[in-house]
Amino acid sequence: QVQLVESGGGLVQAGGSLRLACGAPAFIFTISTMGWYRQFPGKQRELVATITSGGTINYADSVKGRFTVSRDNAQNTMYLQMNSLKPEDTAVYYCNALWRWTNYWGQGTQVTVSS
């Protein structure tokens, strides 16, 4: 079973920064649109950012200007640099890989921003 693995979550004060990473198998990473999603308690997952295999990036309005998504194709790793974090960013962040009709998900990493 394909498994994506997130890392980098933790506790940070408002205004601080965190860098998340997502590793994926090469045969998935190289052909997939990668993305970060987050889920608040009791809510559905929402888009944070996506980056296609060709490097096209899309951000949710709520994070645009604060978060930066990137991918290192040589390392099969996607990153999410999160700056100027707000308490409202507190959520479980999930890595996603979309290949055609198939979605792969990581188990999530908790990001907690204290006020």
Image: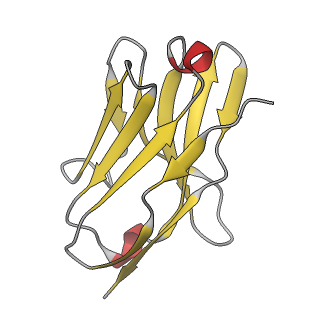
Horizontal and vertical percent position of residue 69: 32, 38
Q: Which residue is more in the foreground, 30 or 100? A: 30
Horizontal and vertical percent position of residue 6: 53, 49
Horizontal and vertical percent position of residue 52: 42, 19
Q: Residue at x 20, y 66 (%)?
A: 84
Q: Is residue 11 above or below residue 58?
A: below
Count of numbered circles in the view: 0
Q: Residue at x 60, y 13 (%)?
A: 27
Q: Is residue 55 left or right of residue 32?
A: left
Horizontal and vertical percent position of residue 113: 37, 77
Residue at the front extreme? 75
- Where, quadrant-wise, is the N terminus in this rendering? top right
Q: Is residue 37 above or below residue 72?
A: below
Q: Is residue 23 above or below residue 7?
A: above
Q: Which residue is more in the foreground, 76 or 112? A: 76
Q: Is residue 70 left or right of residue 41?
A: left
- Where, quadrant-wise, is the C terminus in this rendering? bottom left
Q: Is residue 70 left or right of residue 51?
A: left
Q: Residue at x 42, y 45 (%)?
A: 21
Tell me the quarter of the picture where residue 50 sits: top left
Tell me the quarter of the picture where residue 43 sits: bottom right
Q: Which residue is more in the foreground, 53 or 45? A: 53
Q: Is residue 31 above or below residue 102?
A: above
Q: Which residue is more in the foreground, 81 or 101? A: 81
